[in-house]
Amino acid sequence: MNNQRVVVLKEKKGARYLPCSIGPAEADAICLKLQGVCAPRPLTHDFVCAVIGTLGGTAKEVVINKLENDTLYARLVVTTNEKEREIDCRPSDALAVAVRLGTPIFADEEVMQKAGIMFEPEIGRPIPIQRSPEAAAA
C-alpha cells in the first residue's frame, strides 16, 4: 500500500483508457465533489474555481497534452473577456477543477498513443495496444 492514487479516463468513442497518477489531496478533492460532500471551508480547487468565476471567466476544457519522462502534463483552457488563455497545470489539479465545473476533459492523440491502455472485456486485464513506430520510439 502507498499513497498513490490513479484516475482512469476513458475515451468517449473508443476503448482506450488513460491512467493518471494523482496525489492523495487531489484524489480526496475529486472524491468529495463526486460524492456531493461539501468541505467546511473551500479547498484549493474550490478557490481556483471561485477565482475563475469572480474574474468573469469560464473553464472551457482540460487537455492532457504531453507525456514526458513518464509524467503527464495538462492545460486548463479558460475564457475571459472573449479571449482564451491556456494555463499549464498538473493533470490532477486540472481534473479536480474540471469535476467541480463540469468542464470537458480531453487527451491529445499522441498522449493516448504513448500511455493509453485497453482491457480484455471479460476479465479486465490490460492488453497491449498496437503502437505506431513513432510512439514506441518516444
Image (tube, grey):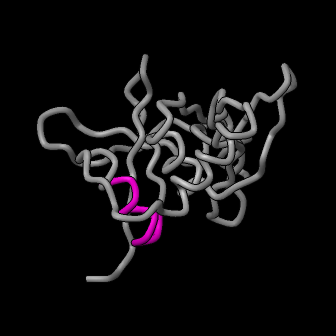
Q: In the image, 90: left or right of 84?
A: left
Task: Indicate whether residue 19 is drawn in magenta.
Answer: no
Above or below residue 69? Residue 13 is above
Above or below residue 95? Residue 89 is below
Q: In the image, 65: left or right of 93?
A: right
Based on the displayed image, in which of its 4 quarters is residue 99 positioned?
top left
The boundaries of the magenta stretch are: 22-31
Q: Looking at the image, which is closer to me, 44 or 54?
A: 54
In the rendered image, residue 89, in percent from the top left (x then y), is placed at 70, 55
Based on the displayed image, in which of its 4 quarters is residue 105 positioned?
top right
Residue at 58%, 31% (x, y): give it. Answer: 106
Based on the displayed image, in which of its 4 quarters is residue 26 positioned?
bottom left
Q: In the image, 48: left or right of 12?
A: right
Residue at 64%, 43% (x, y): give it. Answer: 64
Q: What number of labels is visible?
A: 0
Q: Looking at the image, which is closer to me, 45 or 31?
A: 45
Q: Looking at the image, which is closer to me, 125 or 86?
A: 86
Please name the predominant secondary structure of the magenta segment in the image: helix
Q: In the image, 121: left or right of 118?
A: left
Residue at 62%, 52% (x, y): give it. Answer: 48
